[in-house]
Structures are given as structure tokens and as C-alpha cells.
């Protein structure tokens, strides 16, 4: 369980019709994730790879509507969310820490950009920005 109150949700709403997941955090911040963006961020071994092998998403596939349609969302303990997609995929556990760190709001996106610039860290990997 995360100990930083900023990464503890106070409310989670998965609007399946709109394809939008909204998380209100205990520090008052709100994050909204489009379902398509969440699917691209799937952290499971199949999508991300394991043992040095690339994952399926690394091949930059064209995602079908079933692969990006959110049909369910469940809590994993007190540390993550596990969405279920219309294609049946449900093995990605999105930790609250990762969701907060990837918040797509303009303020958080700008802070990530500034942080990377100040640290001198630039990724050589293409990234998918959450929108």
C-alpha cells in the first residue's frame, strides 16, 4: 500500500460509455484518463514484455475498438486498478503510483517535462502521452 497521501485515491469513476477513468486523489488533485491511452499504457508482461523480450505494444499495433473499449474496472488490494477490456484482456495492474505519475493534466505533464529537462534525462524510447 502506498504511504504518500498524494497517491491515494479518494474516488474512482470508470465511465464505460465515455471511455474515461477519473481519479480524485486525497490531496485534491483530479486525473482523467482516456481508455485508449490506458490501454497503450498496459503494464502487463504480455503488453510490456519480460525477460528482455519486447512486449506486444512495442510493435505499435493498430488497436481494435474491442481492445480499447473499457468494460470493467476492479481494485487490486489497496494499490492498483485492473481494467477489463472488451477483448477479454484483464492482466494489467495499474498502480496508483504509476497512475498519479502519469497524470495527463496540463500541470502534471508540464512538471514531468521540466523534471526531465532539469535532470538531463531524455528517453530514447518513443512515448505515448496520455490524453
Image: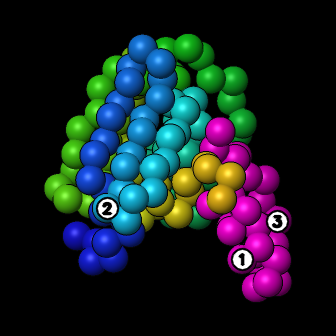
* Residue picked out by circle 2: 26
Q: Point out the image quarter for the C terminus.
A: top right
Does 45 appear above or below 65? below
Is residue 90 found inside the magenta-colored segment of the image? no
Q: Secondary structure at mark 3?
A: loop
Whether residue 123 is in magenta: the answer is: yes
Q: Is residue 90 something one can see in this rendering?
A: no
Asked if residue 64 is positioned above or below residue 122 in the image, the reply reads above
Magenta residues? 108-131
Q: Earlier in the sequence, mark 3 or mark 1?
A: 1
Hey, which residue is sitting farthest left in the picture? 77
For the point 82% across and 77% down, which residue is it? 117
Q: Is residue 74 left or right of residue 96?
A: left
Residue position for label 1: 115
Residue picked out by circle 3 = 124
Q: CA distance from mark 3 to mark 1?
A: 16 Å
Task: Assess disc 1: are there few (<14), some (14-19) or many (≥20) residues with their C-alpha within 10 Å of its C-alpha.
Answer: few
Q: Is residue 65 visible?
A: yes
Amino acid at each position: 500500500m502506498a504511504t504518500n497521501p498524494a497517491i491515494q485515491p479518494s474516488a474512482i469513476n470508470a465511465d464505460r460509455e465515455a471511455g474515461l477513468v477519473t481519479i480524485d486523489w486525497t490531496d485534491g488533485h483530479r486525473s482523467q484518463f482516456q481508455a485508449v491511452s490506458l490501454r497503450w499504457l498496459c503494464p502487463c508482461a504480455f503488453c510490456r514484455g519480460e525477460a528482455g523480450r519486447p512486449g506486444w505494444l512495442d510493435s505499435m499495433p493498430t488497436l481494435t475498438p474491442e481492445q480499447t473499449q473499457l468494460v470493467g474496472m476492479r481494485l487490486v488490494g489497496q494499490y492498483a486498478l485492473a481494467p477489463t477490456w472488451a477483448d477479454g484482456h484483464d492482466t494489467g495492474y495499474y498502480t496508483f503510483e504509476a497512475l498519479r505519475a502519469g497524470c495527463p493534466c496540463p500541470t502534471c505533464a508540464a512538471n514531468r517535462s521540466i523534471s526531465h529537462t532539469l535532470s538531463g534525462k531524455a528517453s530514447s524510447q518513443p512515448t505515448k502521452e496520455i490524453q
